[in-house]
Amino acid sequence: MAKKLTLDFLKTEAASGAALGLAALLALVVANSPWAGDYFSWLKAEHTLQIGPLVLVETTSNWIKEGLMAVFFLVVGLEIKYEILKGELSNPKKLALPIIAALGGMVAPIGVYLAISNLMGGPTQGWSIPVATDIAFALAVFALVGKNLPSSLRVFLLTLAIVDDLGAIMLIAALFSQGVQWLPLFGAIGVIAVMAVLGRWRLAAAFWVLGFGAMWWLTVKSGLSTSLMAVAFAAIVPVNPRPETGASPLRDAMHDLHPYVAFLVLPVFAFAKAGVSFAGLSLEQLFAPLVVAIALGLFIGKQIGVFGAAWLATKLKIADRPSGASWLQVYGVSLLCGIGFTMSLFIGVLAFPGAVDSLEQVEVKLGVIGGSLLSTVVAALVLGLASRRQANRTIKKNED
C-alpha cells in the first residue's frame, strides 16, 4: 500500500515537473524582458487579508513564500510521516541515512566555501549560502529523469531535503533573526497541541483546515518560518484508518492536497522566485571569489557531503542504503542536493544586506544560479544513465 501511494505521487510529479520547469523559465524570460518592471512591482505589491479584527498585510512574494509554501511543507511533512510509520523509513537504519547525509550535506559546503574564499581572498560571511537545498526544484528534476528508478530514492531525497531545509531555517533563525514574538508562537504551538488531542476523535476536514489556518496565522505573526510549523502540524495528523469509515485522515489529506501543490503551488512559487534579472552582469564577475565559492560550495560541497556521509554511514553499519538503489543512483541524488536556488538566494540577501543591484547581491545570484544549474545538469546526466541501466536490468530480468 505504501509503495502504491508513493507511485501515485511520482506519476503526479512527473507531469508537474515540466510545469515547474516552464514556470521557472518563464520567470527568467519575463525578468529580463520589457515587462521586468511590472513583474518585480507585482512581487513587491502589498495585499491585505482581514477576517474581522484580524489583519495581515504581506507582499505578493511573502504571501507565496509563507502562505502557499506552507501548504507544500504540510504535504511534505505528511508524506514523511507516512513513510516513517508505514513505508520505506519505518526501518530505523533507512531513516538514519537521509538524516546523516543531510548533516554531511550542510557541513561540507561550508568547508568548501571557506577554503575557496580564503584561497581567493573573498568574503567569509557568505559561508551559510551553499548550505540549503531547494526541495521543490530538486524533486522536479528527479521526477523528470528518475522514472525508472526505485521510489525509495525519492523518499531518501525528500527526507534529506526537508532535514537540510529545516537546518537552514534554524541557521537563519540563529544568525539573522530580528527577534521572535513569543506570545503568538506559543499560541501556534498551543493550537497544534489542541489539535493533537482532538485528533484522537473523528474530526471533519473543516476542523483540520481551521486548525491549520489558526496555526499558520499565529506563526506568521510570531515571525517564525511557517515551513517549520507546517511540518510540525503534519506530525499530528492521524495516519491509521478510522474504524467507522476505514479512511486515514493523513492519506486523505495527501490525496486531496497533492494535485494542488504539484500543479498550482509549486509552479506559482517557481514563477515568483526564479525571476532573476541579469541586468548589469559582466563576464568578469563570473569568476569573482564570492561567485566561485558559492557555486563550488553547492556543486562540490553538497555531493561530497551527502554522498560521503551516506557511504560512511552504511560502511559503519549505522544506516542502510535505500531499498533497491545502487550507489550510482545515490550519487545522482547527492548531486541534486546542490540545487540551492531560492533558499540560497534568500540566505544571500540576509548575509549581504543591501540593494538588490549591489555588487555582492549580483555575485550571490551568479554563484547560486551557476552552482544550481551545474548540479542540475550533472545530476540529470547521472540519474538518466542510472535510469537507463535500471530499465535494461528490468527488461533482461523479464526476458529471463
Image (tube, rainbow, N blue to C red):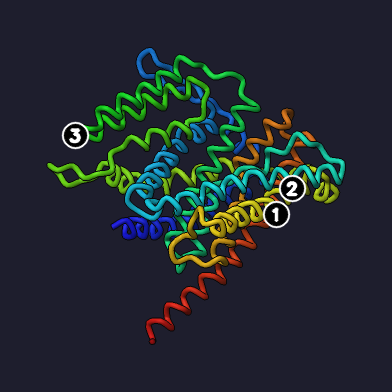
Disc 2, disc 1: CB below 8 Å? yes
Amino acid carrying label 1: it is: Ile
Q: Is residue 279 visible?
A: yes
- Residue holding disc 3: 202
- Residue holding disc 2: 112
Instruction: State the residue at coordinates (51%, 50%).
Output: 98
- Residue holding disc 1: 300
Q: Up-down: is 224 above or below 314?
A: above
Q: Quadrant of residue 131?
A: top right
Viewer-closest of 89 and 357: 89
- Which of the two labelled residues, at mark 2 and mark 1, occupies the earlier sequence position? 2
- Mark 2 vs mark 1, CA separation in Å: 8 Å
Q: Up-down: is 272 above or below 193?
A: below
The tally of labels here is 3
Q: Up-down: is 172 above or below 381?
A: above
Q: Quadrant of the N terminus?
A: bottom left
Instruction: State the residue at coordinates (75%, 43%).
Output: 279
Q: Position of residue 290 (x, y in %)?
A: 79, 42
Q: Would you say 256 lies left or right of 341 here?
A: left
Amino acid carrying label 3: it is: Arg
Instruction: State the residue at coordinates (48%, 54%).
Output: 156
